[in-house]
Every structure is written in C-alpha cells, then in structure tokens.
Amino acid sequence: MIELRTPAEIEAMRPAGRFVAETLATLRDETKVGTNLLAIDRRAHELIRKAGATSCYIDYHPSFGAMPFGKVICTSINDAVLHGLPFDYALRDGDLVSLDFAVAIDGWVADSAISFVVGTPRDEDLRLIETTERALQAAIESATAGNRIGDISHAIAEVARGEGYSINTDFGGHGVGRTMHGDPHVPNDGKPGRGFPLRPGLVIAIEPWFLQTTDKLVTDPDGWTLRSVDGSRGAHSEHTIAITDGAPIVLTDRSAVGAA
Ligand code: MG
C-alpha cells in the first residue's frame, strides 16, 4: 500500500533525516586507511544511542536473510555494493567504501547511502562514484508532482548508460515511512511516463548503485553481502526525499547539516 504523508508528518520526518545525514558525514570523515569495519559499526551504534534513535538494521530479518542483520550499518567494500555486513577488516589504501544507514526517530525512518575512497583513489572508482551521485541528482530533479516513478527510474538509467554502466533492477529505491521498506518500488531503470504517479506527500528513498563491468550480483556466505559476479567495484548513492508541490525535500541532505 502506498501512503501519502501530510506536511506535518513530513516535518516530523526531518529529525531522522538530519541525523542520518550527519552520521554518514561523520563516519565518512572518520573513516581512514586502517579503520576496521567493526569500528565503523560501533561508532554508528554509539551515535544512535546518543541521539535516542532506533536502528532499522539490527533486528532486520527479511525472508532472504539467513539471520537478523545484527549490525547498525551496511559497509560494502570494493566489489561489494549492497547490504555489506560489517566484519573484522581494516581498510586498505584505495578501498572503495559504501555506507548505507537507516534509523527511526520518533517512529519515522530515514535511509541514505554514500560511497567514497580511503587513501589514494583510482580514477575509475571516482568516475563510478560520481556517476551514482549524478544519477541520484537527476532522479531528484525528476521527482516532481505530475511525473511518475518511471521518470525517476529513467533519469537514473540515462546517466548510467551515458557512462557505459549497465543496470540491475532487482534492488532499488522504495517507499519510506514508519518502516524502512514500503511501496512503491523505485527501480533504477524504467520507462518515462509509466508507473505510480508522484503526488505531494509521497516519501521515497532513491538509490542508484552501479558496478563497473557487470550488472550481476552474488551473495556472500554471510547471507547478506552482495558483490559483483566479476570482481568489479560498485558504488551507491541514496537519499530519502518527499514529493511536494514544488521541488522535492531531500530529507537526508548532507549540505543542509553543513557537510559535503
Ligand atoms: Mg539505504
């Protein structure tokens, strides 16, 4: 079921959005060569406790998950791109890091993801990250009342195709509200003018993610981490946005909390 939020409800979602934005900026700034993925998770957990927020991940146990996730942040490294389960690993020079983070505050969820490189970046990694960011921006610009979900999907895919990346539509964006994953599904490719109409009050996460040379994923033995089938690297950018009568509100906007 697709639910529309009142302006007051969207205002009530802002604290969760701000906290997710601030936390991702903090974690990115603190993550260096040598940082252990378990330390990133511990730090995120500490920030959650201080804020009185509730993790959407720690007890998350969907049908495809072998067991509850058990951590509060996804850390996907290099050829891992989605649902990376933090494990005992110290980051190395040039590692491509994707952090995906969702919490609830006062019962409202926000969900966002960023990718970055620690240490010396490879040009092809920077291009991949920049393309996911540009696809997200194009998607947000298309997320106006009167358009449809397919316009968002198409905007994402056009940016990806322009850089020669192929697109996997199995995992994409989703409705966000009292829970992390609701309707509608927001695939990373689609036809303009098709799909659910965008109306003021619709709150969705948009999350382009691309792999360098494939669109196929395999699941790690941990039952969660999704990585490219060919070892090529992935990147992921996600914001939670609210459709309005005008430009969408980017609830997880890091520039709104003074971060890049
Ligand atoms: Mg997310």
Image (cartoon, helix red, strand yellow):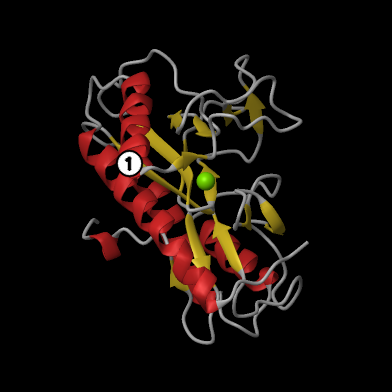
Q: Is mark 1 within 8 Å of ligand 1?
A: no
Asked whether 34 or 100 is in front, the reply is 100
Vertical relation: 162 (above or below) 27: below
Expressed as whole percent of the image width and height from the top left, the position of residue 164 reads 53, 53
Vertical relation: 211 (above or below) 239: above
Expressed as whole percent of the image width and height from the top left, the position of residue 201 reads 60, 75
Question: As drawn, is 216 to the left or to the right of 163?
Answer: right
**Quadrant housing the C terminus:** bottom left
Vertical relation: 37 (above or below) 170: above
Asked whether 106 or 187 is in front, the reply is 106
Image quadrant in which you'd find residue 175: bottom right
Q: Could you tell me if residue 91 is visible in this image?
A: yes
Query: Helix or strand or loop: what does disc 1 sit on?
Result: strand
**Quadrant housing the N terminus:** bottom right
Vertical relation: 95 (above or below) 234: above
Under mark 1, the amino acid is Phe
Instruction: Say which residue appears at 39% left-offset and 12% top-offset.
Output: 88
Image quadrant in which you'd find residue 119: top left
Question: As drawn, is 118 to the left or to the right of 56?
Answer: left
Expressed as whole percent of the image width and height from the top left, the position of residue 37 reads 36, 22
Instruction: Say which residue appears at 60% left-offset and 80% top-offset.
Output: 200
Question: As drawn, is 94 to the left or to the right of 248?
Answer: left
Q: Could you tell me if residue 235 is visible in this image?
A: no
Asked whether 134 or 248 is in front, the reply is 248
Q: Which residue is under mark 1? A: 116
Instruction: Say which residue appears at 65% left-offset and 20% top-offset.
Output: 223
